[in-house]
Image (cartoon, rainbow, N blue to C red):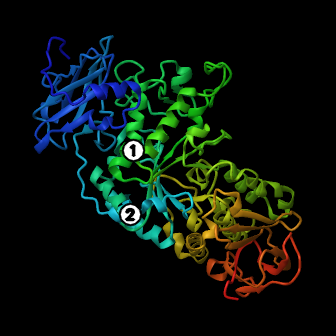
Amino acid sequence: MPSSLTPPPVQASFGDTDVYLFREGTHAQLYRRLGAQLSPGGEGASFGVWAPNATEVAVIGDWNHWSDLADPMRARADGSGIWQAHCPSARHGQAYKYRIRTRNGDVLEKADPFAFLAEEPPATASRIWTLEYDWQDAHWMGTRGAANALDAPMSTYEVHAGSWRRKDGQFMNYRELAHALADYVAGLGFTHVELMPVTEHPFYGSWGYQTTGYFAPTARYGTPQDFMYFVDHLHQRGIGVLLDWVPSHFPTDAHGLAHFDGTQLYEHADPRQGFHPEWNSAIFNYGRHEVRSFLISSALFWLDHYHLDGLRVDAVASMLYLDYARKHGEWIPNVHGGRENLEAIDFLQELNRACYRDHPDTFTVAEESTAWPKVSRPIEMGGLGFGLKWNMGWMHDTLAYMREETVHRRWHHDRITFSMVYAFHENFVLPLSHDEVVYGKGSLINKMPGDSWQQFANLRLMLAYMWAHPGKKLLFMGGEFAQRREWTHEGELEWWMTDQPEHRGMQLLVGELNKQLRGEAALHQLDFDEAGFEWVDANDRDNSVLAFLRKSRDGQAVLVVCNLTPVPRQNHCLGVPLSGTWREILNSDAKPFGGSGWGNLGEVRTAPLAANGHRHALYLTLPPLSTLYLKRDADV
């Protein structure tokens, strides 16, 4: 890169206000100012990149034969570190990078941090692209506030785009995936789809959690317009779309953000704060205002331009704790001597403030694995400001309990009831996610004890219990039909299993659970309010039976009864608040689901007997390894 070449002047698209907001850490639309911006008419493009410690920067690409002589960039005189250039010969779709000379004389070739599209991996250049698209989801966008509200029914199907289903052994593109996935998800009654990260990532095996393109959907499955079509189509089918988003760390690939201008620009310079020992990746410097502007702009970009309904923020715990995955002496305390990352806390609060300010009909979800308080509480109350938080404690305790042989469950009864002690401390999502079916953990069905019949019965029981428990629901793909094989990102799900009666029965059960969740206000309306839940019997450890009521605002109630052993129980007495006929609206042991067919012949009448603190009682038949939902028939 010749140092004597003088860059031509460029039209200022990054003005004084942009500089102020950028330096303040509150610029929420950097993608409109930096990166590659095509000129009107598509002839030529303006480029902007942040590289404050570079001595020279040039745009190299297809139009100038990748020569740094043709399009050198000019550094702004205001000390912002922004370099700019206008390239008259650049055209839509062409590949490019920034060639950067560092202070020590090294030459780096970097992808554009603000690119809207990258070359398909393993290629690493950025592409000049636009975001024009004719959206057809106006009805969804105008009404989605109700679908995304805390009192709405919400069951989310978590998907890895590359391994859900394939076509002739190859990846489906976004458009193909849109139709196949929408048909499937709508058929089962899920309300939302959550995509594991589709932000561009060089290593497919990272599942998207090692992101290099914070403004680019991965080119593995198509263009930005193809991904817009995906979201648009699901919205037209009444399905919300959530995106996994990863502001916690980034990979150190040579073309990416790491050492971007020869210095630790996006990451902390001190490895005790800037290097993640567990994931061998770099950690963002949340105390640097320009980095905060970059990340907040990325978050809002997906809501602004892709109509996404929410962001699930990955690995929040790793951001909150300075000693996360570190031994004594490997971390730096904060100014108060504590382990809390004060800069990350401020960033997360600003992130949530910006998301709810600009898109109040969307929501954010924290994957936070500790007992950090008030994750999903308003910032004004000292919270982090997320809308929802994954309930990792519920997940761990429930799976640990369900792994126990049924004869031993009486000794572990507290594990299945403990979640109700803290169920209303946060706005919880109950996740059975991809993390629970990889790396030797086995599939959901293979976690269950007993012979094959008991395994299926246990899983049906657990899913029905989960759908009745306070909190929103999330299930990873394959769990809905009890895939036997542990999930792998290579290949597709074992769809052939759905032709087998027991697997098809599991699929039918999940569809019925979603139907009940949507149809019964008692099962969703007060998920985050203690008034929506009441124990009927939490202490029957000898029989391993649980019974509780879910309630709606208008007093409707659903009685939920779990028999956690393979022993059928007849004439099991439970108190209920109202007399009359209680209909069996769901029985996980029903024959269409693969069960044995035990039950209550559809309904049961109360007896005038006080039990469990109520004036009326039901004498129920509890099928083996089952969950029952019963609702009082208001017409009787």
552 relative to 280, above or below: below
Residue 287: image x %, image y %?
48, 24
Does dot 1 land on a helix, a strand or a loop? strand
User: 109 left or right of 393?
Assistant: left
What residue is drawn where x is 44% and y is 24%? 288
Residue 452: image x %, image y %?
69, 70
Q: Nearer the viewer, residue 218 or 162?
A: 218
Label 1 – label 2 distance at C-alpha: 24 Å
391 relative to 28, above or below: below
Mark 1 or 2 closer to N-term? 2
Residue 541: image x %, image y %?
86, 63
Visible residue check, residue 219:
yes
169 relative to 516, above or below: above
Q: Which residue is mark 1?
A: 199
- Residue type for callout 2: Trp
What residue is drawn where x is 81% and y is 83%? 606
Residue 600: image x %, image y %?
75, 84
Visible residue check, residue 384:
no
Does dot 2 land on a helix, a strand or a loop? helix
Pick the quarter of the image with the C terminus. bottom right
- Residue type for callout 1: Thr
The quarter of the picture where residue 122 lies is top left
The quarter of the picture where residue 403 lies is bottom right
Pick the quarter of the image with the N terminus. top left
Please give the label number shown on residue 140. 2
What residue is drawn where x is 58% and y is 27%? 341
What residue is drawn where x is 37% and y is 47%? 302
Please give the label number shown on residue 383. none
